[in-house]
Amino acid sequence: MKRTFPLFLVFIFGILGIIPFIIPHPIVQNLDESIRNDILKILVAFALVLGLGSLLKVHMDKIKRKRENWQYSWILIISFLVSSIIGLFGGVAGAGPLPTSIGSFHFDIQTLYENIFMPLGATMFALLAFYMASASYRAFRARSFEATLLLITAFIIMIGIIPLGDKISPHLPSFAQWIMTVPNVAGQRGILLGVALGIIATSLKIILGIERSWLGGGE
Amino acid sequence: MSISLSPWIWISALLSLAVFSFLYKDNPFYRFAEHLFIGVANGYAVTFYYHNILVPTLFDPLFRQGKLLYIIPFIIGILYFTRFIPKISWLVRIPIGITIGYYVGASIPATTQAFIIKQIQGTVLTSTNFQAWNAGSWGIVWSVIVFIGVLCSLSYFYFSKEHKGVLGVTSRIGIVFIMIGFGAAFGYTVMARISLLIGRLQFLLGDWLGII
Amino acid sequence: MKFIERLTTIDRRIIYLVLAIVVLIPLISRSPERVRVMPPVEKLYNAVDTIPKDKVLIIDFGYAPQDMPELEPMGFALLRHAFEKRIKVLALCLYVQPLGLAQKALTEVTEEFNSVAQTNADSIIYGRDYVFLGWQPPPLIPMLGMGISITNVYPGDYYGNKTDTLPLMKYVKNYNDVALLVSLSAGSIPRSWVAYAQNRFGVAVAAGVTAVSAADFYQYYQTGQFTGLMTGMKGAAEYEELVETRLNIKKSRKASEALPSLTYGHLVMIAFIIIGNIGYFVQRKRRQK
């Protein structure tokens, strides 16, 4: 029961997922819509809570056990609570019961997003430019024919896609574009076909109950 | 333009600098910024999770429109939390099974059609494909290159036979195409990463310092 | 020889500094650089431009702050194009992080138009000219569900309004009323739009993607599964170029203004790779001797 019933459900819902692609009859389509809108949408809503709960649990635990850098977990929890309260009670467009401005100073959820979340997220990824420069300088070596080919292609693309490439020769951007649409497509498609076949095989294994790792441990 | 007097712009700028400080070495400013980021990100997610999902998807139909059948998915959803109760933790497999089942089921025809059939259609040597390049008779050449490239790239990933003889040649050609693909990807990645840095500098120089 | 050895051991902080300087200096001049528009972007522009009056454009704002510099200019340029041509827009997000950026783009571009509008007809009005559907996870739900009924998938919009009360949604029922769907994304989502929405309901899909994933996406453009394609900051600059030259909209062009910095950034990257390789080959030769 503990394993068979979930495996049975996967099989049934797997088939229910496939059929609407094959049978366009309104009865099938309406049933399909109902599965998505009335069941899956709600299940996902619960799954999201689970994810959030796990994150908070990890940090509460860190504080409780006073693990390394535990003080910072307070920052996470406090900022989470404050922004949640502002968002939940201040409303999406500042239309909730909680006031989200004092005079001309606004602190609604969109303001927090634009001035805290946005700069932090953007800057964290901006660091990658530096790491990539350093890593390419250290590791990108023309050791073999394949590596040299990769390097030359990269150089052509790097020059071809900037306006300087057009100034050097109007053929250069066209050549870069050709690389993207002809040899690049051929190489990428070889990989894609392999990946797609892998997805189908794995999906079939899950539906048929051959692949069961999603059940997790235990009975 | 001159330096910004908005407190929020200053907060944004100082937080950006706190993250940039990691380039020198790990430090408390960076760690503060990192944890603040996760906290606010999740607070933001909770906000829209409630306003955009829970209210219109669950609360309104259940409590305002009286669609009592919604109690069934509601109960199945609650089973996610049995994960924390060891005795009945297996029940979590029910919502997971339903979700995974539908997902993988739908992915089979979608993947077959969009990533296999359509991609093969785009590879075979037909007059439609030749003309699609808008390159005159060169279109035939480009199509032939793509055709050979795809076959050879595929042969490179065929590991059931030793790469010798014909397979040795085709897999060798295949790796040429794959390396060109990786090179192209690397070239574009450089653009991507530098773009992100430019975006931040545009903010610091423009919105904050008012230089640009 | 010592000089060459030094070339191979440049401190990472010097590399950081050089990169920062070459990217920073050209930004100060703030002059947008002209670009040659390539066919994938032009096709996208033409597809948007020819959307009939009774159909809508869906924009999937799929970019989070970490993808903002590349994809936000695309979002702005697309909205300017659509609003200028009075093409109705449905905006949506498949994940939570991009919501705020979608809201920002919609608010700012609407404001650009409304600040010069003389009459109600000239203005861009929420509910009549565009609707922000908000966030509905997981992505598969809206992708498939909008083929049957958009308001069933999104009973409420981003602001909490009932979608079936909005004037625009009175005649936009499902994908049959959608001329084009543009997915601005840093991940594999444009591919999923093709696999689910296009495959099952035949909706035309185009994409604006980050440069990191650009190489993966050209194959869908080649097969015609993507009507058009914008890749990275350069792709955004090309769309900005078209919006300015063909529609005569002269607004801030963040991607085009960044191109001089991008040029120097690329050159410095190439230089560092070449320097690293010179050092490598000299050392290898010495070892062989």
Image (cartoon, rainbow, N blue to C red):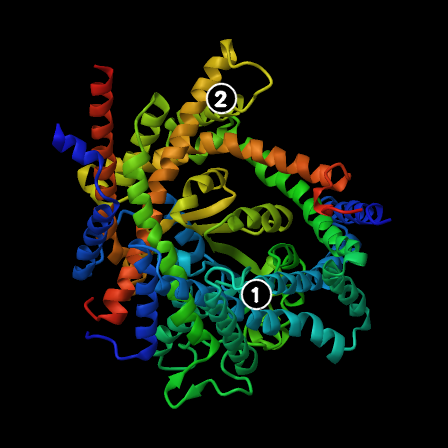
> On what subunit does the disc labeled 2 rest?
B
The residue under label 1 is which amino acid type? Trp
Residue A182 visible, this orientation: no
Find the residue positioned furthest to the front: A66
Q: Is residue B169 above or below residue C63?
A: above
Q: Is residue A100 above or below residue B199?
A: below
Marks 1 and 2 sit apart, C-alpha to C-alpha, by 42 Å
Tags 1 and 2 in contact by the CB under 8 Å rule?
no
State the residue in front, B130 or A116: A116
- At numbered mark 2, what does the secondary structure look like: helix, strand or loop? helix
Q: Horizontal placement of C104 versus B122: left or right?
A: left
Find the residue positioned furthest to the bottom: A103
* Residue A28 coordinates in the image, percent (x, y): 78, 52
* Residue A101 coordinates in the image, percent (x, y): 43, 86
* Residue C35 coordinates in the image, percent (x, y): 26, 49
State the residue in front, B20 or C168: B20
Q: Residues within 10 Å of mark 2 (few under 14, many from 20)?
A: many
Q: Is residue B129 above or below residue C193?
A: above
Residue C44 visible, this orientation: yes
Q: Is residue C196 above or below residue C89?
A: above
Q: Residue at x 70, y 76 (%)?
A: B60
The residue under label 2 is which amino acid type? Cys
> On what subunit does the disc labeled 1 rest?
C
From the image, tell me which residue sits under label 1: C135
From the image, tell me which residue sits under label 2: B152
Q: Residue at x 24, y 58 (%)?
A: C257
* Residue A168 coordinates in the image, percent (x, y): 18, 38
Q: Residues within 10 Å of mark 1 (few under 14, many from 20)?
A: many
- At numbered mark 1, what does the secondary structure look like: helix, strand or loop? strand
